[in-house]
Image: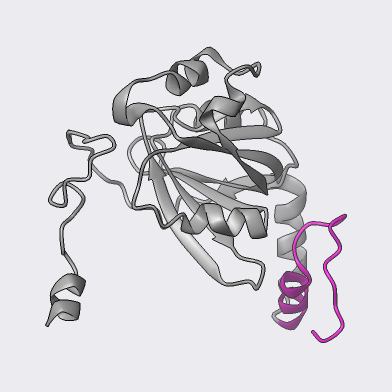
Amino acid sequence: MEGLTNDRTVHGSCGEHFLQERYATTDRAQTFYERHVLDHLNEQMREFVGLQEMVFVSTADAAGECDSTFRAGLPGFVHVIDERTLAYPEYRGNGVMASLGNIIENPHVGLLFIDFFNDIIGLHVNGSAVVVDNDDIMGRDVPPAMHEAMTASGGRRPERWVWVTVEEAYIHCSKHIPWLQKRDKRIYWGTDDARQKGGDYFGTVRQRSG
Protein backbone atom coordinates (compact mmCIF):
# COMPACT_ATOMS: atom_id res chain seq x y z
CA MET A 1 0.00 0.00 0.00
CA GLU A 2 2.89 2.41 0.72
CA GLY A 3 3.42 4.86 -2.10
CA LEU A 4 0.13 4.09 -3.84
CA THR A 5 -2.09 7.00 -4.82
CA ASN A 6 -5.67 7.02 -6.00
CA ASP A 7 -6.27 7.45 -9.71
CA ARG A 8 -9.56 9.29 -10.07
CA THR A 9 -9.79 8.28 -13.74
CA VAL A 10 -10.68 4.71 -12.73
CA HIS A 11 -13.39 3.39 -10.45
CA GLY A 12 -12.54 2.68 -6.84
CA SER A 13 -9.66 3.57 -4.54
CA CYS A 14 -6.19 2.09 -4.49
CA GLY A 15 -7.20 0.34 -1.28
CA GLU A 16 -10.11 -1.31 -3.06
CA HIS A 17 -7.90 -2.57 -5.88
CA PHE A 18 -5.19 -3.73 -3.47
CA LEU A 19 -7.70 -5.90 -1.57
CA GLN A 20 -9.40 -7.09 -4.74
CA GLU A 21 -6.09 -8.53 -5.85
CA ARG A 22 -5.33 -9.98 -2.42
CA TYR A 23 -8.70 -11.71 -2.14
CA ALA A 24 -9.10 -12.56 -5.84
CA THR A 25 -12.24 -10.49 -6.41
CA THR A 26 -10.88 -8.26 -9.19
CA ASP A 27 -13.02 -9.75 -11.96
CA ARG A 28 -16.18 -9.59 -9.86
CA ALA A 29 -15.46 -5.99 -8.86
CA GLN A 30 -14.70 -4.95 -12.42
CA THR A 31 -18.02 -6.38 -13.55
CA PHE A 32 -19.78 -4.30 -10.88
CA TYR A 33 -17.94 -1.13 -11.89
CA GLU A 34 -18.77 -1.64 -15.55
CA ARG A 35 -22.42 -2.54 -15.05
CA HIS A 36 -23.58 -0.44 -12.14
CA VAL A 37 -21.38 2.61 -11.48
CA LEU A 38 -22.23 5.89 -13.23
CA ASP A 39 -20.70 9.37 -13.01
CA HIS A 40 -24.18 10.92 -12.99
CA LEU A 41 -27.75 10.20 -11.92
CA ASN A 42 -29.76 8.49 -14.62
CA GLU A 43 -33.52 8.95 -14.89
CA GLN A 44 -34.35 6.05 -12.58
CA MET A 45 -31.92 7.32 -9.93
CA ARG A 46 -33.34 10.84 -10.11
CA GLU A 47 -36.86 9.49 -9.67
CA PHE A 48 -35.71 7.37 -6.73
CA VAL A 49 -34.09 10.32 -4.93
CA GLY A 50 -37.26 12.36 -5.49
CA LEU A 51 -39.27 9.84 -3.46
CA GLN A 52 -36.99 9.44 -0.48
CA GLU A 53 -37.61 10.77 3.03
CA MET A 54 -34.18 10.03 4.48
CA VAL A 55 -30.50 9.90 3.63
CA PHE A 56 -27.36 8.86 5.51
CA VAL A 57 -24.50 11.34 5.10
CA SER A 58 -20.79 10.56 5.52
CA THR A 59 -18.09 13.23 5.75
CA ALA A 60 -14.50 13.56 6.98
CA ASP A 61 -12.39 16.51 8.05
CA ALA A 62 -9.03 17.48 6.57
CA ALA A 63 -7.26 14.93 8.79
CA GLY A 64 -9.58 12.11 7.73
CA GLU A 65 -11.56 11.97 10.99
CA CYS A 66 -15.00 10.69 9.97
CA ASP A 67 -18.58 11.49 10.86
CA SER A 68 -21.82 9.91 9.75
CA THR A 69 -25.21 11.48 10.20
CA PHE A 70 -28.83 11.15 9.20
CA ARG A 71 -31.05 13.65 7.42
CA ALA A 72 -34.79 13.38 6.82
CA GLY A 73 -37.73 15.37 5.56
CA LEU A 74 -40.79 15.18 3.38
CA PRO A 75 -40.53 12.96 0.28
CA GLY A 76 -38.13 14.57 -2.15
CA PHE A 77 -36.50 16.81 0.46
CA VAL A 78 -33.21 16.04 -1.30
CA HIS A 79 -33.71 17.98 -4.50
CA VAL A 80 -32.38 16.89 -7.89
CA ILE A 81 -31.12 19.99 -9.69
CA ASP A 82 -29.87 18.04 -12.71
CA GLU A 83 -28.19 14.72 -13.45
CA ARG A 84 -24.99 15.84 -11.73
CA THR A 85 -26.29 18.01 -8.91
CA LEU A 86 -28.23 17.44 -5.69
CA ALA A 87 -29.09 19.77 -2.84
CA TYR A 88 -30.43 18.99 0.62
CA PRO A 89 -31.54 21.38 3.36
CA GLU A 90 -29.97 21.98 6.75
CA TYR A 91 -32.44 22.99 9.44
CA ARG A 92 -31.87 24.44 12.88
CA GLY A 93 -30.15 21.79 15.01
CA ASN A 94 -27.88 21.47 18.01
CA GLY A 95 -25.42 24.03 16.64
CA VAL A 96 -22.46 21.64 16.50
CA MET A 97 -22.21 21.71 12.66
CA ALA A 98 -20.17 18.48 12.58
CA SER A 99 -20.87 17.42 9.01
CA LEU A 100 -20.90 20.99 7.66
CA GLY A 101 -17.63 21.70 9.42
CA ASN A 102 -16.11 18.65 7.77
CA ILE A 103 -17.35 19.74 4.35
CA ILE A 104 -15.66 23.14 4.53
CA GLU A 105 -12.38 21.35 5.32
CA ASN A 106 -12.87 18.40 2.97
CA PRO A 107 -15.58 18.56 0.29
CA HIS A 108 -15.85 14.80 -0.28
CA VAL A 109 -19.24 13.47 0.79
CA GLY A 110 -20.99 10.11 0.60
CA LEU A 111 -24.79 9.86 0.54
CA LEU A 112 -26.69 6.62 1.06
CA PHE A 113 -30.40 6.51 0.26
CA ILE A 114 -32.27 3.38 1.36
CA ASP A 115 -35.89 2.55 0.63
CA PHE A 116 -36.92 0.33 3.55
CA PHE A 117 -40.64 0.43 2.76
CA ASN A 118 -41.43 -0.17 -0.91
CA ASP A 119 -38.72 -1.32 -3.30
CA ILE A 120 -36.18 -2.36 -0.62
CA ILE A 121 -33.15 -1.05 -2.46
CA GLY A 122 -30.40 1.50 -1.91
CA LEU A 123 -28.49 4.13 -3.86
CA HIS A 124 -24.98 5.40 -3.16
CA VAL A 125 -24.11 8.91 -4.34
CA ASN A 126 -20.54 10.13 -3.85
CA GLY A 127 -19.32 13.56 -4.77
CA SER A 128 -18.08 16.93 -3.61
CA ALA A 129 -20.12 19.40 -1.61
CA VAL A 130 -20.30 23.06 -0.67
CA VAL A 131 -22.35 24.76 2.02
CA VAL A 132 -24.61 27.58 0.83
CA ASP A 133 -26.79 29.84 2.98
CA ASN A 134 -30.50 29.69 2.19
CA ASP A 135 -30.70 33.38 1.27
CA ASP A 136 -27.73 33.10 -1.10
CA ILE A 137 -29.54 30.73 -3.46
CA MET A 138 -32.89 32.49 -3.54
CA GLY A 139 -32.15 33.87 -6.98
CA ARG A 140 -30.83 30.66 -8.52
CA ASP A 141 -32.71 28.61 -11.08
CA VAL A 142 -33.91 25.74 -8.87
CA PRO A 143 -36.86 23.31 -9.04
CA PRO A 144 -40.20 24.78 -7.83
CA ALA A 145 -40.34 22.37 -4.88
CA MET A 146 -36.93 23.57 -3.72
CA HIS A 147 -38.02 27.19 -3.97
CA GLU A 148 -41.07 26.36 -1.85
CA ALA A 149 -38.77 24.79 0.77
CA MET A 150 -36.50 27.85 0.78
CA THR A 151 -39.41 30.18 1.48
CA ALA A 152 -41.20 28.02 4.07
CA SER A 153 -42.00 29.56 7.44
CA GLY A 154 -40.92 28.73 10.96
CA GLY A 155 -38.79 25.67 11.64
CA ARG A 156 -39.47 24.31 8.18
CA ARG A 157 -37.37 27.03 6.55
CA PRO A 158 -33.80 25.82 5.94
CA GLU A 159 -30.94 27.85 7.33
CA ARG A 160 -28.60 26.61 4.62
CA TRP A 161 -28.13 23.94 1.96
CA VAL A 162 -25.55 21.34 1.03
CA TRP A 163 -24.97 21.51 -2.72
CA VAL A 164 -23.52 18.21 -4.01
CA THR A 165 -21.79 17.65 -7.34
CA VAL A 166 -22.20 13.97 -8.25
CA GLU A 167 -19.08 11.96 -9.07
CA GLU A 168 -20.32 8.39 -8.57
CA ALA A 169 -23.75 6.79 -8.31
CA TYR A 170 -24.43 3.10 -7.87
CA ILE A 171 -26.83 0.56 -6.42
CA HIS A 172 -26.82 -0.85 -2.89
CA CYS A 173 -28.20 -4.37 -3.23
CA SER A 174 -31.40 -5.36 -1.48
CA LYS A 175 -30.46 -8.73 0.03
CA HIS A 176 -29.60 -7.45 3.54
CA ILE A 177 -31.98 -4.47 3.70
CA PRO A 178 -34.82 -5.14 6.18
CA TRP A 179 -38.41 -4.55 5.22
CA LEU A 180 -39.82 -1.99 7.65
CA GLN A 181 -43.32 -0.73 8.34
CA LYS A 182 -43.87 2.99 8.32
CA ARG A 183 -45.91 4.65 11.09
CA ASP A 184 -47.18 8.19 11.41
CA LYS A 185 -45.14 10.55 13.54
CA ARG A 186 -45.61 14.22 14.27
CA ILE A 187 -42.52 16.25 13.36
CA TYR A 188 -41.63 19.18 15.61
CA TRP A 189 -39.72 21.27 13.10
CA GLY A 190 -37.00 23.47 14.61
CA THR A 191 -37.94 22.68 18.21
CA ASP A 192 -35.60 23.11 21.17
CA ASP A 193 -37.87 21.03 23.42
CA ALA A 194 -35.54 18.50 25.04
CA ARG A 195 -38.22 15.80 25.28
CA GLN A 196 -39.07 16.02 21.58
CA LYS A 197 -35.36 15.86 20.73
CA GLY A 198 -34.84 12.65 22.71
CA GLY A 199 -33.99 14.06 26.11
CA ASP A 200 -31.15 12.37 27.99
CA TYR A 201 -31.82 8.98 26.38
CA PHE A 202 -28.22 7.75 26.76
CA GLY A 203 -27.74 9.23 30.24
CA THR A 204 -24.84 11.51 29.36
CA VAL A 205 -26.28 14.50 31.22
CA ARG A 206 -26.83 12.41 34.35
CA GLN A 207 -23.37 10.92 34.04
CA ARG A 208 -21.64 14.28 33.70
CA SER A 209 -23.68 15.92 36.46
CA GLY A 210 -23.10 12.96 38.81
Q: In which quarter of the image is the C terminus?
A: bottom left
Corner quadrant of residue 114: top left
Q: Where is residue 91 in the image (x, y as percent from the top left)?
A: 39, 38
Q: In which quarter of the image is the N terminus?
A: bottom right
Question: Quick check: 123 above or below 200?
Answer: above
Corner quadrant of residue 117: top left
Residue 48 or 21: which is nearer the viewer? 48
Residue at horizontal 18 percent and vertical 71 percent from the top = 205
Question: Quick check: 88 above or below 179?
Answer: above
Horizontal side of residue 111 vs 33, given as left or right: left
For the record, the magenta segment spans 1-22
Residue at horizontal 75 percent and vertical 66 percent from the top = 13
Q: Does the magenta stretch include residue 19?
A: yes
Question: Quick check: 201 above or below 93?
Answer: below
Residue at horizontal 21 percent and vertical 36 percent from the top = 188
Question: What is the total number of numbered labels drawn onto the structure image?
Answer: 0
Q: Where is residue 146 in the image (x, y as percent from the top left)?
A: 51, 21
Residue at horizontal 50 percent and vertical 33 percent from the top = 78
Residue 45 or 198: which is nearer the viewer? 198
